[in-house]
Image (spheres, rainbow, N blue to C red):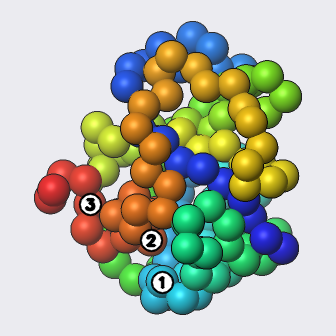
Amino acid sequence: MIEIERKFLVTSEAFISESINNYRIVQGFLNTNPNRTVRIRIQREKAFITVKGIGNSSGISRFEWEKEITRNDAAQLLKICEPGVIEKIRFEIPSGKHTIEVDQFLGENNGLILAEIELTDENEPFVSPDWLGKEVTGDPKYYNSQLSKTPYATW
């Protein structure tokens, strides 16, 4: 139940041609308290409720619990989420033995493109594509829960 993830800015749209899959995500937050965020997400034909805890000092590791729920339940829960629903297109890009997920944000976060890579260990090496830019792991302003409250367009 510990998620180990690093997050980066993306410097170009070159990732699109390397993508093997993409899909739309709509998500809202029932709670954006940094100590325990509660997220509702619809992606493809599935929906999830996710609870995330506070990150460690590096921001790379944190508690994550997720359960699949029905799309109908998710749609109902999205109606009572805090203001600021996040919409994005997620691209999956193979990179060595990993898959990098690149989120191209829409709406009030349009123009922001972030890449995430999940690891099995905080120090696990990974292949870094040319379009992977500055690391923003642990910077709260890039958390989706914070983007829902302070969108990229307002920076």
**Of the image marks 3 and 2, the number of the one nearer the N terminus:** 2
At horizontal 48% and vertical 63% (from top left) the residue drawn is 138
What type is the residue that disc 2 sits on? Ser
What is the x, y in percent for residue 9? 41, 39
Q: Are marks 1 and 3 in contact (CB under 8 Å)?
A: no
Q: Which mark is residue 145?
A: 2
Q: Is residue 88 left or right of residue 108?
A: right
65 or 61, which lies in front? 61
54 or 52, which lies in front? 54
What type is the residue that disc 3 sits on? Pro
Q: Is residue 91 above or below residue 118?
A: above
Question: Label 1, label 3: how many angstroms apart (C-alpha)?
Answer: 16 Å
Residue density around tag 3, few if under 14, some if 14–19, many if 20 or more, within 10 Å: many
At horizontal 69% and vertical 25% (from top left) the residue drawn is 127
Residue density around tag 1, few if under 14, some if 14–19, many if 20 or more, within 10 Å: some
Q: Secondary structure at mark 1?
A: loop
At horizontal 74% and vertical 24% (from top left) the residue drawn is 94
Which quadrant would residue 66 be assigned to in this image? bottom right
Question: Label 3, label 2: how many angstroms apart (C-alpha)?
Answer: 10 Å
Q: Which residue is mark 3?
A: 151
Q: If the image is split into quadrants, where does the N terminus sit?
A: bottom right
Q: Is residue 44 above or below residue 72?
A: above
Which quadrant would residue 99 be assigned to in this image? top right
Name the front one of labels 1 and 3: 1
At horizontal 61% and vertical 25% (from top left) the residue drawn is 128
What type is the residue that disc 1 sits on? Pro
Question: Label 2, label 1: how many angstroms apart (C-alpha)?
Answer: 8 Å
Q: Are marks 2 and 1 in contact (CB under 8 Å)?
A: yes
